[in-house]
Image: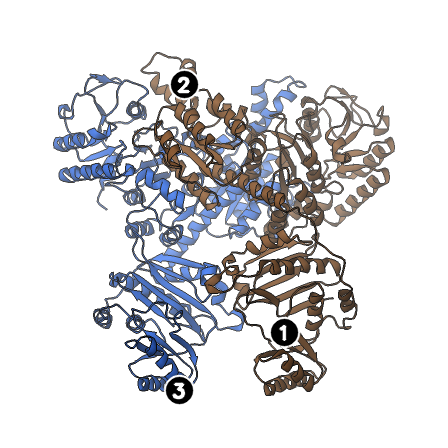
Chain colours: A blue, B brown
């Protein structure tokens, strides 16, 4: 892959920064302070109209005065100055910039105009840039930091791309106390040029990045995002939070970075399809991301839980189960081995509960060794390891009865975790730690030092294990079926049907013919121009039949009494035909086979700004709206995408041998969804497609009604 | 209310403790150390066979040697010694005990026997006790602490009752760094005598307790728990975690305290009915409990969000929305008022985003004042307040360019929060704070000092606001309808039907007659002993009718072809009658009206150990099992319980004017559920009741089929 603009932006050899001064309360100053102190190995050149020295560095009065074109220009100046300065950098020959300054698209019409201007200037000069309205970048490997907070930890495997600057720059306390260390972090702001998908692509091939965290308010090209994420997630876990899926979330995002949000369910579909682990909180982006970045991949769902307390053990066990993981009973061998290290009343079942037990060796070495080496266990969670944190609590009382200094007392209590911290790597299985203690506990510090994730409550460790499991499932999926497109060229017949549509649009018959051209099974049916035609058709199909008005101009045909089902004989066909013609003398009449089947599904295509056509699949029938049981995937769909969306239905048991009904032909059903996506891509003129109901007759799905709207 | 045993246990004037020594690594010793250092104002008397002085206190070689009967005996001795020592304390006259020692019911048969023995000894001497297998108690108001960790904060309004000792004794670091202070905390262990319901009852009337947190692995008398919780939750918020609802959770709980767990959904129903806020993690028990204990009640769903960053603002907004709260657009007046304190590019909409802005006064006083005083806002969440935590990050860099000591620099940065922390009380509205900083930040310390809850990530603050809202809804409910039982005496007719049932059980006809006796609407129907009877019945009912075999001995009558629906004429009735008699010459034949209605529900009663009969209501019909859309409440149900369970269905829109169908008569439907609960209570001999389907015909629910099993 050719080095993209982020390669230079994150690894420049020289930086010019406009907006820093010697006034310590200014944002630009703070950023330059952090840049200097980050240990950035290149040259830093401040631009300032009056100061000759800024924070100890020679300053230049104007961009034109710089001795050479820096690799990277950073602007933290008043909004109105941005276009001119960007122009000046362009003239000088700088080709990469970060525009921190806000006041653009996110503020409304005027700002939007200003943003268009800087895009144009950048284009004229071949400048690639981050922002505007962003908070900069961090690369702890170079190192380089131009955010408002210093780097507190260097060289971590978790990298971030975020539509909020706060999440790369103002959570350092949170990260430090949880032992989380970032690698690269990029604040993308308004994404006038470089966007979060570019960052994902960059981080995907960045050798230091082991896992990627994303904070998303809206994706502007979901199709491209999907293609990139799908590729990246095959090797590297991606965990993402999307906040635009509610009314207030969308409003907030739009004020923040001018993002265009979409409904929550299309992001559910996008993330599943892309192999992205979706979470609901930024805490989970960090914590799960850290677990994914540091631990060996989980290879299966079987987790051993080891604690010194039944409460946390139960909380972990139940959270794992609820998330679809297993807490299997141990084999007899494991149980026997474990038992020898337990007090009499303790439980050697899974979870193992040592109870209040002072033998830390059992908790930290002996039992973990047994669990890690057992083939029936894929991952381990331990709660209850502690030393000085607990000792320190006791010291004030103990010191009244023992002649010992605090330091001696704590030193005496310190335990070694050398063996335990080596186990994940040695056995190739993840280890997660739950502890209510903080870094005042020497064990917590040891875990942090060795990049073993710690969680400040038991259920969080369990939920993080779910994230590892989700990645395991994604990896299995991409290993088994490469996400290749199965698209074919547009069938000639389909083109013909589409171009021959009546001036008023596509009627049900034409829509179904189009579906047929793509191999989608639909009811057998005929268009009847006369009563005699209708009778002939009914005879050919066999009774009972369905008789319906067929015209793109008649909507709500059921409500108008223009759909006759279970038409049993010729008389009834004639009556139905006459009734339709009485309503509209020009209406065509469709005579169709009557499908028998209790199970009804529906499929359709919905359209959202920034998204390719979205294929929807769900329960059909009269009560479909009440159940709201459906899933979304973006076109084009792979066969595997289609199967997964079908199987993600809440009522998925309907697909099997439900109440002695025949199993649904899943291949046929998946094929309908794949082809439906192709149709939407092949005919962008269509703006709505509904196949409802799709009736399962004898296990085979068939489209009984179809609507296509072409505005 | 008379003072229960917990009154004495939590407020004793003298304590004897057996199991402490001068060996600092023993659990009993640590507990005595903590007891002494807690500041307990009463007398402490260690019992030790050899030591004459334990931890500086005169020790007694045997219980019989104690100078008087202590109010409270605490046992931390080997399991085998417990019965004898309890006996000795009983003889001495002590009437309250805490048995910390483990090795009882939770270990299996033998332990179970030992537990029965101590129950008997206690009963003989009138001793009330906590445990065994518990971790003691904390009362930070007295103060008194016999757990393994010292008290780190005194006098908080959050009290706990827990089936895990860890959660009252080993989370002190977690609590301290989050500013959470407990009032009373009780570890109930195996609940051989005093159980978690007793604790709830005690805490309900404890004047210091403002909110109650529960950790539950299983409730042994759910009926009593419901009654107590329902009463308590009217005044005090209760937040609870239940972990026994999965296979591994149940297994873990059973090894831990011998708890008998039940399926998750019955606890869902129990908690809803009891007015208990259910959470999934112990962190939420603490955090939400603390918010509930310290903040004024939330009076409505409208939340204002104020931040200095769009990311956290969006995360809070979307989490609030997803949880059913509102983030309303401000009135023009509020927006104008807020705008004057914002930089030009910032958003005065809700969430307010000050962006990276140094004017802390806007964030801490000016804008909060506007939001708190607006009638359109019920509660406030703020993210971004900070002072020394941020300054401290900058100091290493700044100090290179400024001649200032760290202390001076931090002192200079400290801000006052006096006005803000007074607002919740002054305006009667809750305030929750989100901050990534920890107690190294002076603002975080100030919030903790003034009992304003802080959350270490934005979404958590939003979720805590949901807990306040849930309590608001529970309070509104109990204000509008006192949860009074509407039970009536058993209808004489019902008794008769029940006692006249055939030797082989209740058939469908008898079951429906019983329902009718309670006023539950069922199909009109007749039992036919002859073909002529059947024809007469059909004529009276009018065609079409349903004809079914009616016998408690024939199960799966549909599968055996013994149910004939839509029987249109006399011939068909005769054929149906004959077919049933051909299958079983002794079978009775039921001729019933044929109900017309697309919407089908089902109701039933399920039975679980420790629970009163549980009334179930859900979607009926062929696809019911696939949808799994149902709710549970414990009998007896109030009318309000019944309505809530109906409205809790996922597909609740079916109840309204769905697709031009008539609205369901909710009173009639609720009445069915209330009466169904009564039947289950009145006739404990019945072990299964199913009303399926309940068909909605013309808006009115009617039971079309019913099954009652009497083993």
Report x, y in % for residue B368: 44, 28
Report x, y in % for residue B50: 80, 25
Residue A311, placed above or below residue A644? above
Circle 3 SS class: helix
Q: Quadrant of residue B348?
A: top left
Residue B131 in view (yes/no) = yes
Q: Which mark is residue B556?
A: 1
Q: Are marks 2 and 1 in contact (CB under 8 Å)?
A: no
Q: Toward the viewer: A564 or B388? A: A564
Q: How far separated are the C-alphas under marks 3 and 2?
A: 91 Å
Q: Which mark is residue B413?
A: 2
Badge 2 and badge 1 in a common chain: yes
Report x, y in % for residue A602: 40, 65
The chain identifier of the residue carrying mark 3 reads A
Q: Which mark is residue A570?
A: 3
Q: Is residue A277 left or right of residue A309?
A: left
Q: Which mark is residue B305?
A: none
Residue at the farthest front position:
A582
Q: Is residue A135 left or right of residue A468?
A: left
Crowdedness of circle 3 by 10 Å Cα count: few (<14), some, many (20+)?
Answer: some
Give the residue at x 67% y 68%.
Answer: B707
Circle 2 SS class: helix
Q: Is residue A365 left or right of residue B58?
A: left
Crowdedness of circle 2 by 10 Å Cα count: few (<14), some, many (20+)?
Answer: some
Q: Toward the viewer: B205 or B669? A: B669
Residue B132, placed above or below residue B449? below
């Amino acid at each position: 892959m050719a080095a993209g603009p982020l390669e230079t932006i994150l690894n420049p050899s020289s930086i010019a920064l406009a907006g820093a001064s010697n006034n310590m309360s200014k944002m630009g100053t703070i950023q330059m302070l952090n840049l200097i102190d980050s240990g950035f190995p290149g040259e830093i050149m401040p631009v300032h109209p009056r100061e000759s020295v800024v924070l100890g560095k020679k300053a230049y009065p104007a961009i034109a005065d710089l001795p050479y074109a820096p690799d990277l220009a950073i602007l933290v100046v008043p909004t109105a100055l941005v276009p001119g300065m960007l122009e000046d950098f362009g003239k000088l020959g700088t080709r990469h910039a970060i525009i921190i300054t806000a006041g653009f698209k996110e503020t409304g019409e005027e700002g939007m105009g200003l943003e268009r201007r800087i895009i144009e200037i950048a284009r004229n000069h071949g400048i690639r840039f981050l922002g505007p309205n962003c908070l900069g970048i961090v690369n702890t490997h170079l190192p380089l930091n131009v955010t408002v907070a210093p780097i507190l930890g260097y060289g971590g495997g978790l990298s971030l791309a975020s539509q909020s600057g706060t999440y790369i720059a103002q959570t350092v306390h949170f990260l430090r106390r949880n032992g989380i260390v970032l690698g690269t972090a990029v604040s993308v702001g308004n994404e006038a040029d470089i966007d979060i998908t570019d960052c994902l692509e960059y981080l995907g091939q960045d050798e230091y990045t082991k896992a990627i965290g994303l904070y998303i308010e809206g994706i502007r090209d979901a199709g491209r995002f999907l293609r990139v994420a799908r590729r990246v997630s095959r090797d590297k876990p991606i965990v993402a939070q999307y906040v635009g899926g509610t009314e207030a979330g969308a409003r907030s995002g739009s004020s923040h970075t001018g993002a265009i949000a979409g409904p929550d369910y299309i992001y559910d579909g996008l993330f599943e399809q892309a192999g992205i682990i979706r979470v609901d909180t930024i805490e989970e982006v960090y914590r799960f991301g850290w677990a994914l970045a540091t631990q060996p991949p989980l290879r299966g769902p079987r987790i051993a839980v080891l604690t010194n307390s039944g409460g946390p053990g139960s909380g972990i066990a139940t959270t794992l189960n609820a998330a679809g993981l297993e807490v299997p009973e141990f084999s007899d061998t494991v149980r026997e081995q474990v038992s020898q290290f337990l007090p009499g009343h303790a439980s050697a079942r899974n979870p193992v509960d040592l109870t209040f037990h002072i033998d830390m060796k059992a908790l930290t070495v002996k039992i973990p060794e047994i669990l890690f080496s057992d083939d029936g266990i894929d991952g381990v969670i331990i709660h209850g390891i502690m030393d000085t944190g607990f000792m320190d609590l006791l010291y004030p009382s103990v010191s009244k009865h023992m002649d010992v200094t605090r330091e001696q007392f704590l030193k005496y209590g310190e335990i070694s975790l050398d063996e335990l911290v080596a186990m994940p790597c040695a056995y190739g299985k993840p280890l997660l730690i739950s502890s209510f203690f903080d870094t005042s506990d020497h064990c917590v510090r040891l875990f942090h030092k060795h990049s073993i994730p710690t969680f400040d409550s038991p259920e969080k460790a369990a939920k993080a294990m779910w994230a590892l499991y989700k990645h395991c499932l994604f990896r299995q999926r991409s290993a088994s079926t490469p996400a290749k497109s199965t698209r074919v060229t547009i069938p000639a017949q389909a083109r013909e049907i589409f171009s021959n549509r009546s001036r008023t649009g596509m009627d049900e018959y034409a829509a179904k013919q189009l579906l047929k051209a793509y191999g989608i099974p639909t009811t057998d049916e005929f268009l009847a121009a006369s009563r005699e035609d209708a009778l002939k058709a009914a005879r050919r199909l066999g009774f009972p039949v369905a008789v319906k008005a067929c015209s793109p101009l008649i909507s709500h045909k059921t409500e108008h009494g223009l759909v006759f089902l279970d038409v049993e004989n010729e008389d009834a066909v004639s009556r139905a035909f006459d009734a339709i013609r009485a309503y509209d003398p020009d209406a065509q009449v469709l005579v169709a086979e009557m499908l028998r089947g209790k199970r009804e599904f529906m499929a359709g295509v919905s359209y959202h700004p920034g998204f390719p056509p979205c294929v929807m699949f769900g329960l059909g029938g009269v009560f479909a709206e009440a159940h709201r049981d459906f899933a979304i995937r973006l076109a084009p769909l792979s066969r595997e995408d289609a199967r997964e969306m079908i199987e993600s239905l809440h009522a998925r048991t309907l697909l099997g041998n439900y109440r002695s009904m025949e199993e649904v032909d899943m291949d046929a059903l998946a094929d309908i969804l794949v082809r439906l996506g192709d149709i939407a891509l092949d005919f962008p003129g269509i703006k709505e497609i509904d196949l409802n109901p799709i009736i399962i007759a004898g296990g085979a799905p068939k489209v009984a009604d179809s609507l296509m709207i072409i505005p």
